[in-house]
Amino acid sequence: MTRIDAKFADLKSKGQKAFVAYVMAGDPDYDTSLEIVRGLPGAGVDVIELGLPFTDPMADGPTIQLAGQRALEGGMTLDKTLALARAFREGDTTTPIVMMGYYNPIYSRGVPKFLEQAKEAGIDGLIIVDLPPEEDSELCIPAQEAGLNFIRLATPTTDDARLPRVLQNTSGFVYYVSITGITGSAEAQADDVAPEVARIKAGTDLPVIVGFGVKTPETAKAIAGVADGTVVGSAIVSQIEHGKSVADVLAFVRGLADGAHSA
Amino acid sequence: MADDLFNSFMTGPDENGRFGDFGGRFVSETLMPLILQLEAEYEKAKTDQSFWDEMDDLWANYVGRPSPLYYAERLTEHLGGAKIYLKRDELNHTGAHKINNVLGQIILARRMGKTRIIAETGAGQHGVATATVCAKFGLKCVVYMGAHDVERQKPNVFRMRLLGAEVVPVTSGRGTLKDAMNDALRDWVTNVRDTFYCIGTVAGPHPYPAMVRDFQAIIGKEVRWQLAEQEGEGRLPDTVIAAIGGGSNAMGLFFPFLDDTEVNIIGVEAGGKGVTEKMEHCASLTGGRPGVLHGNRTYLLQDDDGQILEGFSISAGLDYPGIGPEHAWLHDVGRAQYVSITDKEALEAFQLSCALEGIIPALEPSHALAHVMKIAPELPKDHIIVMNMCGRGDKDIFTVAKHLGFDMAE
């Protein structure tokens, strides 16, 4: 049982929806982002998605693109991202951390070495946007063998014929992308999402968490209400972009978490 | 030709879109069903005679194929060695080889019922070709182009707009060709139902590298029969040479000769200011290492942490930090040789072509010509080199004027 499995079991026993928050590691700088990440559990975050910066984030909208650029310009690297996770882990042994990013920095490091380092740093799962099931032998299978969850994205274009393949090697939870598009775009609609979540749940016992286009406590509540939880990324990153203090960022996160938890 | 399939270089990619370890389908889940559908539709079209009949008709009557295979007599005499032929793909409609592939993809898009075409462009040649074919078929066309390239390639931007395309200046990342490709992918992920992504080179997720190669292979197929007509039945080139950015014109020339192992194959990358640790070049094979970007594994310019670096070249059409995966594989198995040419050498070749042959070449094939200039003098007179003159230089005269210190405003 990974920290992710334990967290969802705990939420289930309490009858509570999950609130997942995304921040980019090293945005706006290493120290500030560590402070924010350390504050997330206290602000009501159940699972932390930690962005690994990459020069070419093809699935991300402008907000997260710019966050990655700020981090890279500030000297953020894969090693420092792992160090940030490790530093967080020293004070928190239960909140799961999922690393989210693109494959090349991991491939460049070498998959076996990366998995060993990620595990040692206290990372619990991976969401790698540009690795569909067709490329499972690259990282998905080795990650599961190393004891890390590999969380797959399911999307509105994942039809019924394809869904079993998408669910097959997924673990931890399923991340349903609420819209066809990039992060931070159009507002997610609970009415559209509900039947899709039902469709996915028919094929798996894993929790289904919905992200993309969730920006406000109201949407967080509405979307979490039709799923097992929700993810917010761009709206939080946008607070950091606008130079808000750590306390203000965490207060904003608290509002979103309360929204999701009230579902 | 090879005796059996096991010894053939022409059977790739495999069912996973791999050329050896290169290629693949590294895309987000949203796009995965779309590229699987594209692959299925392309497989159908490939064996459908009516698809190729339509292509042949347009190639002949709209593009002006076959392009001539021209014996460059004065260049040959000047260099004093190998006999040099130029494959004149710069004479195609829109001035480059790009339209060979665009026609294929747009006909496929029409068969798939897509009504909106998107494309990325660097120098603007692929964008112009896409805008042209979209105008011909009455399709909506959106071209993503790095903001920096929009500024330095104004004539092509205006051409695209005249042809009815919307040109979107890309400011994300550093506003270059790779960022234009990122934004095109972001568009596609958003507009999945009606949109067809027309990629301009032999890169991207499977089936693009194979599909674009197949459409461009008309270049090498023509060279085979044209050379036989001029030099005698069965005579093959001794060396084929082409410039490489992503590598589509080169793949098109090389592919039909891959199993004729007596034919030397040379790809010429853009060496910029020189292939050094300063990385002011676009020579992915000579100065990069394998990585994953834009849907495929290939050689990439990247730093130690796997972050992608910007290429640098005088030629906007070669200014890309990656290369088609089939080239990466041909490089690793040793079937093709890859070299690099600096900006300075390309400029010299550009001027020589103008002076001796009356052909103003694009800066891209000027790189290939610069390598011809290096090797031809050392080769015997019965050695035949075929070089792909893949584009004409109209778009580059402003850049060249600047480098030669000529004030166009006078």
Image (cartoon, coloured by chain):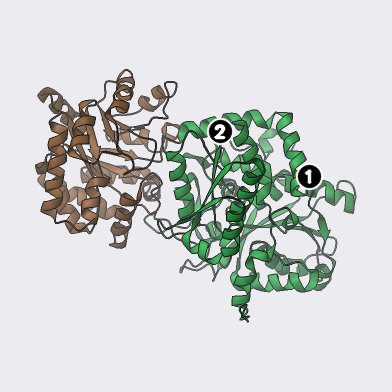
Residue occupying the point 66% across, 31% down: B45
Which residue appears farthest toward the right when viewing the image? B232
The location of residue B77, given as percent across then percent down, is 84, 71
- Chain letter of the green region: B
Colour assignment, chain A: brown
Subunit bearing disc 1: B
Residue B193 appearing in the image: yes
Answer few, some or many: residues within 10 Å of disc 1's Cα (few below 14, many 20 plus, some between 14 and 19).
Answer: few
Residue occupying the point 24% across, 31% down: A223
Looking at the image, which is closer to me, B364 or A222? Answer: A222
Q: Badge 1 is on which residue? A: B60
* Residue B329 drawn above or below residue A47: below
User: Which disc is residue A125 wearing?
Assistant: none
Q: Badge 2 is on which residue? A: B38
Looking at the image, which is closer to me, A195 or A75? Answer: A195
Report whether A53 appears left or right of B146. left
Q: CA distance from mark 2 to mark 1?
A: 26 Å
Question: Mark 1 and mark 2 in contact (Cβ < 8 Å)?
Answer: no
In the rendered structure, which amino acid carries the disc numbered 1? Ala
Report whether A138 appears left or right of B40. left
Q: Give the mark nearer the N terminus: 2 vs 1.
A: 2
Subunit bearing disc 2: B
Q: In terms of secondary structure, where does tag 2 sit?
A: helix
Looking at the image, which is closer to me, A249 or B68? Answer: A249
Picture mark count = 2
The location of residue B245, given as percent across then percent down, is 58, 56
Residue occupying the point 37% across, 40% down: A129
Quadrant of residue B274 in the image? bottom right
Q: In terms of secondary structure, where does tag 1 sit?
A: helix
* Residue B63 drawn above or below residue A133: below
